[in-house]
Amino acid sequence: MCSSAWAFRPGSITGTSNVADQNEHGREGKRPAPAPAPTRIRRPTGGRRPMTPLAKGDPWSLGGPPPGGPAVVALGGGHGLAMALIGVPVAAVVRVADDGGSSGRLRKAHDVPAPGDLRKCLVALAASDTVWREAFEHRFRGGDLDGHALGNLIIVGLTQVFGDFGRALEEAGRLLECAGRVLPATTDPVVLTADAGEGPGADPVEGQVAVSNSMDRIRRVHIVPEDAKAHPEVVSAIEMADQVILAPGSLFTSLAPVLCVPAIREALAVTRGRIVHVCNLQPQVPETLGLDATDHLRAVIDHGARVDTFLYHLGGELALDEIAVRALGVEPVAADVAGPNGHVHDPAALAKALEGLL
Amino acid sequence: MCSSAWAFRPGSITGTSNVADQNEHGREGKRPAPAPAPTRIRRPTGGRRPMTPLAKGDPWSLGGPPPGGPAVVALGGGHGLAMALIGVPVAAVVRVADDGGSSGRLRKAHDVPAPGDLRKCLVALAASDTVWREAFEHRFRGGDLDGHALGNLIIVGLTQVFGDFGRALEEAGRLLECAGRVLPATTDPVVLTADAGEGPGADPVEGQVAVSNSMDRIRRVHIVPEDAKAHPEVVSAIEMADQVILAPGSLFTSLAPVLCVPAIREALAVTRGRIVHVCNLQPQVPETLGLDATDHLRAVIDHGARVDTFLYHLGGELALDEIAVRALGVEPVAADVAGPNGHVHDPAALAKALEGLL
């Protein structure tokens, strides 16, 4: 399943520079305490270059900030994308091919897109003072409901009521008073597969969980069907964006699946907005074991994305070859964006660095 | 589990008179299409007698109508209570000892009060234009969630988040834009038992489902523990009410359990409001098989409730002995309140009849 989320964030973001690289382990694991989100989301009115005026009915109109500020879209999925949204003045995007955990069970039993990633992004964009933030993340223990997140059940229930996944996310976003919208990258049911191992004759690995756990080096991922349609509002959001963030997180199971949707790649090719790939901080074992920072960027470009800027954390665990990055036509930018433990980004620092690139 | 719901309703209720009697079968069965609810709930400013002014911080203040209108409380449970709330300018109450279906499973697995009845009342009091009405009543089919109503899952999830069932209902009521509040009659975990059969030595029947299905004639029900505490706001709502409705529905498994809570009986004894028992339209098999309308009233009084007025449907299936009713100190009032099929009340007609008794 491919999904994308976009949203807006306020942010006092004044810019900073160093490097950014990051890895988000433990997709359902304990999440570090988020930075306090601003209580009421207002798009900043400043910016380093002229902002694209947003038409009425633009993709950010629902719950978004007033026109005049930057239009930001983030693409990716999982914990990494949700983290990138916290405290960022942005729109964002998420992974899509989830077949594990509560989401996977719901997807199989109810024939709906996996809701987990979208739930996390909704929560990341939620107003800080709503009780529904905590309620959406609440996991039941015991009985029939064991392991299910309440937010997943609400999203699936609304999808069945409306017969429309997008509308369900819109309504959930309204409940959470989200600063922006969260949309699936594609509304088609898709399965993630990967070319892995060294030989060209190897069988592809199938399913997000299997890809994520593959001990063979992953070369490329695909979605089946390959021509899955993009959600139309995702396409227009990318086209109209001032900045498109390729979020940190699982490289092959969160970000790359979004890039597999043809219309999303095409929108990235033509957008006037600056496309910033935020690199992970460390390898994700086993998914990206052995890849350095430059390899992460190469993988994104190999999946068809245009990248303008590569934001990395200077002194991080992943080596970076600046000359190779420039040779790929990409500007490397260092920013001090790692949190105190060095494992995950500091949301406020990341937001500042990204605002500095507007 | 004993629970009570109260709420307010607008209503252009101008009064009508005939008789009311009713029975609500199929507690999880298909519900007849509700009468269109008024879009915005405003308490009527008129009334046949001076209204009790409501203090700030009164039990109706959350989502209730503005001060000056009648304060109405309804006691009972299940489908019958929810029906009585539709289109009524009121507050209402619900059954409490639910141990069957989705509610029973949730109660056992998660050690929370059974949410089903409270959910139905919340929905009955909800704004007509909210998507959450339908979402709360949505039942999942298949998988782990089979048979669960989304609203039940939301109530249980919020209860776990807050550690407080009452606060969970308050938040759910806010989401549904309810015209009034829904509260559990008691916050203590209680079990329903019944004295049934002819001999005094017979073992009591235990559990709401068992009581409801008992083939022996039920003489009296009890809650264990007998001294379960009433929700304090239920007590103050009854004491301050202009009208208290003893709702139609399951006599021994919905209404009587609420009356078993000592502080609720005491509040009924002292309230200045008129206590109206709305009689069922037909027997509920097997729970009330063989009881006529007068027997229904006697059962309510035997459970310790003061009753001022007995609202019944003239020409209904249950015979009524007016002289016997008066001998019990109760005023019989006939109203034409049955729906077209004669099995359930017409919500609008019932609302009118009840307003006529203010």
Image (cartoon, coloured by chain):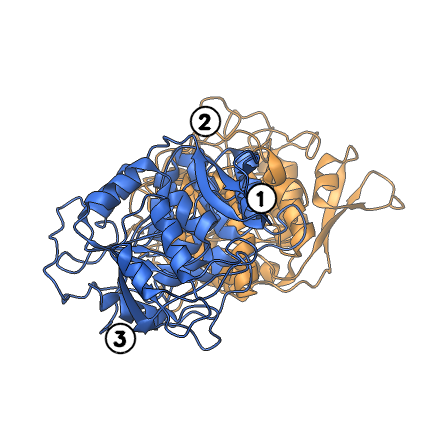
Chain colours: A orange, B blue
Where residue A237 is drawn, which disc sits there? none
Density class for disc 3 (Cα within 10 Å; few <14, some 14-19, many ≥20) is some
Q: Secondary structure at mark 3?
A: loop
- Residue hosting label 3: B16
- The reply to whether the C-beta atoms of the residues labelled 2 and 1 are less than 8 Å apart is no
Q: Residue reaching furthest right?
A: A201
Q: Which tag, 3 or 1, sits closer to the chain's start?
A: 3
B234 versus B274 height, above or below: above
Q: Which residue is mark 2?
A: A339
Is B139 or B58 nearer to us in this picture? B58
Q: Nearer the viewer, residue B322 or B8?
A: B322
The kind of residue on which mark 2 rests is Gly
Mark 2, mark 3: which one is toward the viewer?
Answer: 3
Q: Residue under label 1, please give it.
A: B210
Question: Does the rendering let one see residue A113?
Answer: yes
Which quarter shows the C terminus of chain B? bottom left
Decide if residue A289 is on the left or right side of residue A133.
right
